[in-house]
Amino acid sequence: MATLTYLTTTHFDFGTLEMLPKMLKQEGITKPLVATDAGLVKAGLVETVLGAIGDGFAPIVYDGTPGNPTEEAVKDALAIYEAEGCDGIIALGGGSSMDLGKAVGLLAVSGGPLEQYDPLTGGAKLIKGMAPLIAVPTTSGTGSEVSVGFVIILEDGRKMTFASPAFIPRVAICDPELTMGLPPMMTAATGMDAITHCIEAFLTPQVNPPAEGVALDGLRRGWQHLPRAVADGSDRDARWQMMMCSTEGALAFVKGLGAVHAMSHAAGRIRRVNPHHGTLNAVFLPAVLRFNENTCEEKYARLREAIGLEPGGDLAAAIEGMNAQIGIPSGLGEMGIEESDIAEMVEYAGKDLAARGNPRRASPEDFEAMIRASM
């Protein structure tokens, strides 16, 4: 049996930010917490969004979101939400801000602690509700604006994935204008995040043909337009296409994800390095494609077709070529991850929710081999 779920209302195009006041009224939000980060304040995007909100609302800004959102930051934002009497959330930024906003929205209505909602222990049954949340992405990568999940580093060091239909934002406003100033390296890293979502969601064995069609469409768009967006950030068509790739990748991963994300989550909890999630995905993807290939031959043929690779071509090598073209680091070592980190990464990767979606079961030895191949 297949259960097909699609998903939330997404307003998508240049200029859709103008719809934000209408969406706030629609959701009954009068005093939103704007969950964002200091970089977006500095870039002027927070001011742009506050200007779009206009009169009649009393937004409160929380700009302390870390690059990999933490439980401590969630608690800080929640304290402001409650002290200020907020009644909803605008999650503004990349995946980190949107994930933090989702966690605040969950705790504001359902209460803590956060770890009780671990889906691997049946925690989704404890969800009582969410504060209304409007997601406004400023990158084209995570797709959290339409996804069922969020990821938080807990106070005990675990990087935990939370998943439930309750976590899908009420509304997503995808305005590519907000991505026009994204630097080349961040464009590359977030773009490879979106491409990885499309590939891993497509390969996950759960039966959902509509999601697979969405994944392949997103992959085609991303593969064709990511080099253009990196080379020329003012290319409006490339920015539009990459935001669509990002959104489609997250619509597709309602099916689940795989070993790439399991290892990226494990590496992302290394606070000494604080590595970017999308960059990790790009670096791990070739090794996982090589690991899964004999399990997914028919699907690999369709992936090759989507990116214009000849029949029987080396998908992993194609990803390595794209990474090199757009300036992604050549390996984990270049990102600051060391030999001494591997054992802990193996342990956490095997426990990660995403590991369950990989088309080929990975043992601890398999995870170690893939990590070493990515160093």
Image (spheres, helix red, strand yellow):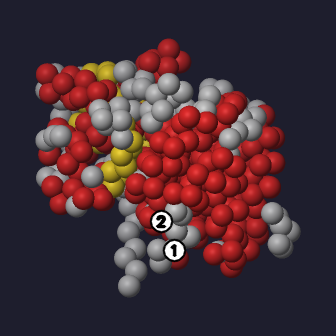
- What x and y, as percent, mark residue 22? 32, 40
Relative depth, front residue between 224 and 175? 224
Q: Amino acid at mark 1?
A: Pro
Q: Which mark is residue 357?
A: 2
Residue at point 47% right, 78% down?
A: 207
**Residue 22 shown left or right of residue 137 in the figure:** left
Residue at point 71% right, 35% down?
A: 329
163 shown above or below 279:
below
Disc 2, disc 1: CB below 8 Å?
Answer: yes
Residue at point 30% right, 35% down?
A: 156
User: Which image quadrant: the N terminus?
Assistant: bottom left
Residue 259 visible to an observer of this rendering: no
Mark 1: give few (<14), some (14-19) or many (20+) Cα within 10 Å.
some
Mark 1: secondary structure: loop
Q: Which mark is residue 248?
A: none
Choose top left, top right, bottom left or bottom right for residue 23. top left
| Residue found at the far right of this picture | 310
User: Which image quadrant: the C terminus?
Assistant: top right
Q: How many marks?
A: 2
Q: Amino acid at mark 2?
A: Gly
- What x and y, as percent, mark residue 27? 24, 44
38 shown above or below 120:
above
199 shown above or below 26:
below
Mark 2: secondary structure: helix
**Residue 58 shown left or right of residue 336 in the figure:** left
**Residue 182 shown left or right of residue 81 in the figure:** right
Q: Name the residue that disc number 1 marks.
A: 205
